[in-house]
Image: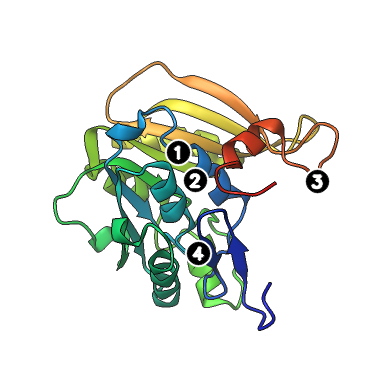
């Protein structure tokens, strides 16, 4: 936290300012940014779309991981869009990241993408706060799950993959909606704090063609200390965070 109270997240190759964003940098974004596209060779990921970029954290992580990729990042909230633009411009990847002020429903000009990522708003019929930006970032009124998946499907290249992190308690709904819109689950990672606690999130990998479904469990915390990242998380985040 800087002296002015502005939030600054310092990574190895870039910084993130997120004080203007309704959703701050959190564990969900770190998991998605570190793992999305992991089953595809680096050189095959040339076009990436980040839906609802917020501060731009996912766009920057993916630009670092996929050095041959051009990243388009869209954000409907104007102040967050401006902050994502500034974060990208201050990074070493500024020439490969384009931030667009747009809703998903009205964006796209015929492009298709090798990788589409989204850390979407997922509260449904929950009480709202007085903060408009926070509500937009956290509640799915403006981007319901069927709309997200249907629109994303139309933007996927034939061999592309969509990666989404979503609450574990909505797994059945996610499976039903993805099946209905014609997206197929290839990998499903259950994210848990530790073995003693129930699952928190699911990281979904979706494609246009059916394939065998692989399931995994990712523990966030060390078995010996719940304030320390697990070995798997440390390995995934090592390129980004100085431990």
217 shown above or below 131: above
Identify the disc placed on residue 159: none
Residue at the right extreme, as displayed: 224
Q: Of the two numbered discs 3 and 4 on the same chain, state the one appearing first in sequence.
A: 4
Q: Are marks 3 and 1 in contact (CB under 8 Å)?
A: no
Residue at the left extreme, as displayed: 110
Taking depth in this image into account, of 6 and 91 the one nearest to the observer is 91
Q: Are marks 2 and 1 in contact (CB under 8 Å)?
A: yes
Question: How far, Cα to Cα, is label 3 from label 1?
Answer: 24 Å
Q: How far across and down, in percent of the image, does residue 69 sit?
A: 30, 45
Question: How far, Cα to Cα, is label 1 from label 4?
Answer: 20 Å
Question: How far, Cα to Cα, is label 2 from label 4?
Answer: 17 Å
Taking depth in this image into account, of 102 and 223 the one nearest to the observer is 223
The residue that label 4 is drawn on is 137
Q: Residue at coordinates 62% horizontally, 71% vertically from top-left?
A: 7
SS for callout 4: helix
The residue that label 3 is drawn on is 227
Question: How far, Cα to Cα, is label 2 from label 3?
Answer: 21 Å
Q: Is residue 174 left or right of residue 209?
A: right
Q: Residues within 10 Å of mark 1 (few under 14, many from 20)?
A: many
Of circles 3 and 4, the one toward us is 3
Q: Are marks 2 and 3 in contact (CB under 8 Å)?
A: no
Location of the N terminus (image quadrant): bottom right
69 shown above or below 41: below
Identify the disc placed on residue 33: 2
Identify the disc placed on residue 36: 1
Count up the numbered dots.
4
Quarter of the rendering containing residue 190: top right
């Amino acid at each position: 936290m800087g002296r002015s109270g502005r939030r600054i997240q310092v990574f190895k190759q870039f910084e993130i300012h997120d004080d203007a964003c309704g959703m701050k940098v959190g564990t969900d974004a770190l998991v998605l940014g570190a793992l999305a596209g992991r089953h595809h060779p680096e050189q095959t990921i040339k076009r990436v779309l980040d839906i609802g970029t917020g501060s731009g954290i996912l766009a920057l992580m993916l630009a670092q991981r996929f050095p041959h990729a051009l990243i388009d990042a869209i954000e409907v909230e104007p102040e967050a869009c401006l902050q994502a633009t500034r974060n990208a411009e201050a990074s070493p990847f500024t020439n490969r990241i384009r931030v667009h002020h747009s809703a998903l429903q009205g964006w796209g000009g015929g492009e298709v993408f090798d990788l589409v990522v989204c850390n979407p708003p997922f509260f449904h019929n929950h009480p709202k706060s007085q903060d408009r930006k926070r509500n937009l970032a956290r509640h799915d009124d403006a981007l319901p799950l069927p709309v997200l998946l249907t629109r994303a499907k139309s933007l996927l290249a034939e061999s592309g993959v969509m990666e989404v992190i979503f609450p574990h308690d909505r797994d059945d709904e996610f499976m039903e909606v993805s099946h209905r819109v014609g997206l197929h689950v290839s990998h499903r990672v259950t994210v848990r704090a530790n073995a003693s606690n129930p699952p928190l999130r699911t990281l979904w990998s979706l494609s246009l063609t059916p394939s065998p479904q692989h399931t995994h469990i990712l523990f966030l915390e060390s078995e010996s200390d719940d304030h320390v990242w697990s070995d798997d998380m440390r390995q995934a985040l090592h390129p980004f965070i100085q431990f």
